Image (spheres, rainbow, N blue to C red):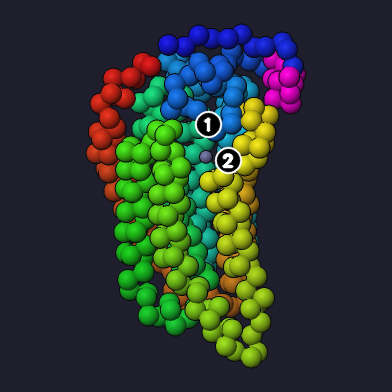
Amino acid sequence: MTTEKKITDHVNDFSDYVRSFFSEFLKLQPTLHRDDVHSVFHEPAIVKYYRPTNQPWRYYLISLFKIHNETGNVWTHLIGFIVMWVAIGNLFISYDVWTERHSWPMLVFGLCCMVTTMTSTCVHLLHSKSIYHHYSLFLIDYIGVTVYGFGTGIQTFYACSDIYTYEYMKSVYLPILTLVTWINFIVLCLANVRLGNNDCDIKRKLVMIAMQLVQGIVVTLPIAARYIRCYFNDTCLVSSLYHLSTIYIFLFISAFFFGSNFPEKLFPGKCDILGQGHQIFHVISVANQMWQLHSMRLDHFYGAADHTDPDIVVMLAALLVLLLTDIMSYAFLKKLIPTSLKDKKQS
Ligand SMILES: [Zn+2]
């Protein structure tokens, strides 16, 4: 199906310049124009530098160090993974994590973020293998996406929650959070399998964003009452909750870049390597993760989490159950990938 094109020596724009600058040094692999790859791989307004399908797995692993249209997506989350790894290491320096129970939600949150960034890195790196692998790997990406939501719930409930909401929900919140996260994963997978073609791309994104909002409501519940009680308290300034408000500003901005394909839609073909909205979405997501960790430390420092009683064993057990059910569900859901696509493992 595909006809490989040699790396062009003709420099038309910044993306061409980046490729030509590194072509000798990195021994860049040939890439393809969008007209030469199947439409399932097409990204809006990304014109060139698609990797060919049907190459050995080693080819896609090595492409980590090459320059193509997924390079920015891979490295933004790989660096995010490393940054969170270092941040977790710092927790071990700042806290006695074996006895300080308020550091445990930070550890579990950081672990969830690392699952998210690592699954995303692997998916962006490997999904060009074939049409079938494109679909099946993006189902795994949703494990990471939803586990981040789970981690955010751990943050809002055990580190930043309102005292009365915590007392009211402490026996049910973690099971509800785990269940909603799993349902979110199922819906995202079904949206990808059933609506995952270019004609329905906007519809698929709307379903994905809507389900994220549902999980967003669940993770917002524990902190919502802090805003309400502060608003009606003459001695409390809502601006004192800026550390929590900033998280939502980050989320709205990242949702915009995820859903809009801005700025590449304004400059088709100019953001093929750097500047894609999805790359900006990745960077803002990682910045938000770091800010969330900072917010947990702030609330702990000022005693806003003193009423919580997190248990590392229970939190890790819930995360393990979630991951196991996600993996078992994945094994079933990938069978729903249309047979016509399964036949295209070599496409
Ligand atoms: Zn991504």
> Height in image: 1 above or below 42?
above
Residue 169 or residue 312, whichever sits in front:
169
Number of dots carrying numbers? 2
Residue 273 in view here: no
Q: Which mark is residue 261?
A: 2
Query: Element type at marker 2?
Result: loop
> Height in image: 46 above or below 94?
above
From the image, which quarter does the N terminus lie in?
top left
Q: Are marks 1 and 2 in contact (CB under 8 Å)?
A: yes
Residue 127 in view here: yes
Q: Which mark is residue 43?
A: 1
Q: Which mark is residue 35?
A: none
- Most common SS among magenta residues: helix
State which quadrant residue 66 falls in.
top right
Give percent across and percent down for residue 41. Answer: 47, 27
State which quadrant residue 236 falls in.
bottom right
* Side of 141 relative to 19 (left or right): left
| Mark 1 neighbour class, 10 Å CA radius: few under 14, some 14 to 19, many 20 or more | some
Residue 176 or residue 341, whichever sits in front:
341
Residue 237 part of the magenta-drawn span: no
> Height in image: 156 above or below 320?
below
Q: Find the distance from the CA under tag 1 to the CA under tag 2.
A: 9 Å
Q: Name which residue type carries label 2.
A: Asn
Query: Element type at marker 1?
Result: loop
> Height in image: 115 above or below 223?
above
Q: Magenta segment range? A: 12-25
Q: Name which residue type carries label 1.
A: Glu
From the image, which quarter does the C terminus lie in?
top left
